[in-house]
Image: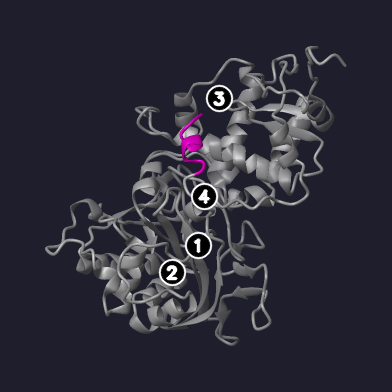
Amino acid sequence: MNESADITLGIPPRDECQKQVRKILQSGSFRNASMLQQLLQYLAEKTFTHGAEPIKEYTIGVEALGRSPDFDPKADPIVRVQTHRLRQKLKDYYDSDGVHDYIVIEIPKGQYLPIFGTVEGVETLAGKDSVWGAGAVSSNEQLLQSALDPADLQARHAAKQISRTALIAIAAITAFTAGLWIGSRWAPWGAGRTSAGGAKSDLAGSSDPVIAFWADYIGNDPTPVIAYPDAVFLLDNYNDLFRFRRGATDYRGAPVDSHLAEQFASNPALVARAGQLYYENSYLGFGELKAVGMLSNLFGQMGYKPIIKPSRELTVDDLKQHNVIMLGSSLQNIAVAHFSNLGDFSFKNPDTRLEQWRGIIVNAHPRSSEARAYHTERDPSTQVLKADYSLITVQPGIVPGRYIADLGGLDTTGSEGAVSYTTSSPGVETLSKAIQLPGNTGGRRSFPVFQALLKVQLDKGYDVVGVSLVTVHMLPSTQPGNEGRGVAQVLQP
């Protein structure tokens, strides 16, 4: 074929493309990525109905991501952020679950609508130097002329999934916390909370191990962010709640479209009989409630002014300017699931619909004394919960000198246990020794990045009566010069 010749690709029938979208949405790569699921589904449908005409960022924000009609794309980068993440997630899918798929879905840089092609067609174009242009599936199902970046193609068809050290920034994220929930809307504590002493520069050298540990983590950030899970439920007129795992959301009290509710709720048959439903996000797990209290009290005593906000309201600026502490596991806090998983431990749920106390912590590389999976433990006769497991994960942030920590359990009690452990002297001393954190050094240096598995002993199913360290696995540190990689890309469409 002449190198300068134009290439026009035919695409599979529309129903085959739609099947491919459904396959991707149900894959392990997209599990727990609810916002990316709804974004891909929305953009794919727009591809068939919208043709090659560009779609506006405002339209995506309002229709796909649940932003209000006064949404301002210039002030809120959620569409650009989530589209960037969707590109990465699609690449992850074709690196792993979809490595043998015949149909390829790609979102070209600089646009939002995806385009569809076949493996043969894409590989034919791999020798071209340009990237796929503004092509999309038109009404007569013809693909516009385009060419694929060969580096992207090779990465997508690699047999091994590429390990990524750069974390993906997130903006607005929905979340859910399992277990008992307390109905209370949190006030924005952080912005107005003050301490007379102010943050001290020598706290990392404190003789108190708890103060030294957290001062070393927070560093020169006077206003660290504590992000709690902000669950989204569907509320009926009888004040009963239904789980709403994914789908477009709106502000609290807004009516829910019945078709949307039945499509995405965990129990669609029950939801169909519930009558009018409304969005409700004012419920918080009691474990996370206590965790926020413990952390904010500690930070206040240290002279910091913590910013406390829902995980869904985290912004790129938060991740760039602050050290962030997130609460809840990836099963309950979608914000956690949206970060790259760099470690051996991960939260899994064998059943995507039935999940009450069915989640497990999987150990990808168990040592001789470690198990491959950890799950909540119950009394064999009464079935009352007697033990939970939780993870403390500290990962590099998206810019040098910033970190992202997650403290979450399989149940809400695990989150409380993790924070209780890291705010107690015996717990911090044991953990600091395990991660080889030097004491009384002062000054700012690289904080160890790691995953610590904890066992949380319970009484009556909800009282945390003891926490012990099971094991620690260190994470690979970011390579010099890579800490901020991807930040500029995240902010670009």
Work out how far the residue at label 1 is from the one at label 2, CA to CA, in angstroms. Answer: 8 Å
Instruction: Quickly name the residue at label 4.
Output: 167
Indicate left or right for 57 with 341 as reference. left
Work out how far the residue at label 3 is from the one at label 2, CA to CA, in angstroms. Answer: 40 Å
Residue 164 in the image, given as x and y percentages of width and height? 60, 51
Mark 1 / mark 2, whichever is N-terminal? 1
Instruction: Quickly name the residue at label 3.
Output: 110
Indicate left or right for 301 with 1 as reference. left
Is 244 drawn above or below residue 17 in the view shown? below
Q: Is residue 118 visible?
A: yes
Magenta residues, as a range?
Answer: 485-493
Q: Nearer the viewer, mark 2 or mark 4?
A: 4
Q: Residues within 10 Å of mark 2 (few under 14, many from 20)?
A: many
Task: Examine the structure image and report whether residue 490 is included in the region drawn in magenta.
Answer: yes
Q: Disc 3 marks which amino acid?
A: Gly
Residue 241 in the image, given as x and y percentages of width and height? 45, 55
For mark 3, give the secondary structure: loop
Q: Is residue 257 visible?
A: no
Mark 1 / mark 3, whichever is N-terminal? 3
Mark 4 / mark 3, whichever is N-terminal? 3
Q: Disc 1 marks which amino acid?
A: Ser
In which quadrant of the rendered view does residue 116 lie? Answer: top right
For mark 1, give the secondary structure: loop
Task: Examine the structure image and report whether residue 109 is included in the region drawn in magenta.
Answer: no
